Structure formats: C-alpha cells, structure tokens
Amino acid sequence: TFDRTPLIAGNWKMNMDHVQAITLLQKLAWTLDDAKHDFGRVEVAVFPPFTDLRGVQTLVAGDDLPIAYGGQDLSQFDSGAYTGDISGAFLAKLACKYVLVGHSERRTIHGESDDVINAKVKAAFTHGLVPILCVGEGLEIRQAGTHVEHTLAQLRADVAGLTAEQAAQLVVAYEPVWAIGTGEVAGPGDAQEMCAAIRAEVGTIFGDESAAGARLLYGGSVKAASAAAILGEKDVDGVLVGGASLDAAEFASIVRFES
Ligand code: PEP
C-alpha cells in the first residue's frame, strides 16, 4: 500500500518525431489497456519533445486516455524576446499536467543554475503545472561521499520561496548523474537513503504536510527488471525513466511493477 499515488514518468528526451510519438503512445495505451491497468493506483506520465505535444494532446483527448503528459523544460519567463524558449503558459494551453525542471542534461549542456531552476519551478506553479524537479550528484561527489549534502543543497536552492501548499504538490526526482543512461542503477537502498533525506528536508523547510504530500521519484537506468525493488522502498513514490520509456512493452512492465 502507498501513502501517495505512485507516478511512473517517461522522459523521451530528444527522441520520437511527431509521427513516432503517436505510435509509441498508442502502443503504450494498448498494452496497459490489455493489462487492465488501474491508472488510479499507479499514475503514468510521458514527456515527449515540444513538437510532439499537440499530437499527444489530440490522441489523449480523442481516445480519452488516462495518461498524463508534459514538457521536458519550460522558460522561467511568461512570454517575450526569448528565442527558442517555451513558456509554461503554452504548455498549460496544451493541457500538460507536469513539466520536468532541472534535468541534469539541462544543468550540464545548457548551464542551468539553481537560480534559473528555482525561477522555472515557480513559473511552473504560476501556470498550473506540477514541476518534476530533478536533483542528484555526479560521480565525483558520490565517490567523495557528500552526495546527500550536495543533493539537499540543490533541493533547498531550487524550492526556495515556494509555499507549503506548492511543496505538498511537488514531485522531486532523485537522479544520480552517474546512473543516467549509463546502465548503472543505484541500489534500492541508495534510492531510499536519498528520498528519505529529501522528504525530511521538505519537512524541515515546509512542514509535515508538505513532506507527506510531495512525491519522490528515483531515476537512472531504470528497467522493468530493476523497477519493482526500487519502488518497494518506503520513500520512493515512483520512477523517472529515460531510455526504457522508448519501448512501450518495457515501460508498461515498469508501470505494472506490482503485478
Ligand atoms: C532520465 O533521463 O531522466 C533518465 C533517468 O534516463 P535513463 O533512464 O536512460 O538513465
């Protein structure tokens, strides 16, 4: 039994054009429908590239699919001279529920600082989107043994200024950078250690209700074979899946971890 509805989220990254996206989503929906998946028990969300979102919206609305979706990033600004950026207002107009914020690939490739990520988290809430805030340490920090302090410092900076109500809705994904796309999975104990620390920190900053409400995910090379053990941990409320979310059958197996 879970205190919070588990969330299984698929980050497609820069994969799947608008035609491939529809095929993948249809396959996923059929597979879960065949398995009689109870979406009230385990929530499913996908994060396609921006150019796929309109097609995803049309399919989800047309077929009444119980699958949530969102953007992989958003601008911290609402509109204006920000060439190439996408506003949270635009995502909300496409009926996105969630948005990824601060993925390690945004932090490293695009140089996003905690200040920018904090502004994006706030922008998400402003537009009625639930941010899935990604935090986590690189290999050197893990080897130095300071991964908990490092990740909590990111968390504190990224959630600064939120209200307790917002914090209660927040989703935080712990994604150790050394485990993303590398095939290295953190053990269930590592995921639990960090998620427990994150929950305690949310409680310290925002209070017990926020700590009880916030959903904490693990991400990093999760596959069907590793998902169930990680999801069995007390403070882990879901997983954020990259590579394995591009295979409908594999991703559906992760969603169906209890069965
Ligand atoms: C991710 O990008 O969020 C991720 C966890 O990727 P992968 O599952 O491929 O490691």
Image: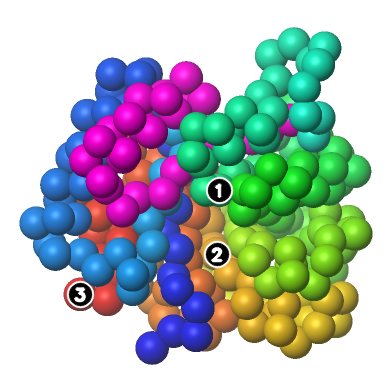
The three-letter amino acid code for the residue at tag 3 is Ser
Where residue 184 appears, as percent x and y from the top left, is 49, 54
| SS under mark 3 | loop
Q: Quadrant of the C terminus?
A: bottom left
Q: Is residue 31 left or right of residue 182?
A: left
Does the closest atom of ligand 1 sit within 8 Å of the Cβ of label 2?
Answer: no
Spatial separation of the CA atoms under disc 1 and disc 3: 26 Å
**Image x and y of residue 133, in percent:** 68, 53
Mark in the foreground, 2 or 1 = 1
Q: Amino acid at mark 2?
A: Leu
- For the residue pair 68 and 244, the one nearer the viewer reads as 68
Kindly report the distance in space between the C-alpha atoms of the residues bearing marks 2 and 3.
19 Å
Label whose residue precedes the other's in the sequence (2 or 1): 1
Q: Give the residue number, with chain letter if any, for mark 2.
A: 217
From which residue to which does the magenta span run?
49-75
Q: Which of the 4 image quarters holds residue 87?
A: top right
Which residue was labeled with disc 1? 98
> Label 1 is placed on what type of residue?
Tyr
State left or right for residue 74 relative to residue 242.
right
Helix, strand or loop for disc 2:
strand
From the viewer's perspective, is the residue at label 1 or at label 3 nearer? 1
Residue at the (25%, 54%) spot, across then down: 252
Dot 2 or dot 3: first in sequence order is 2
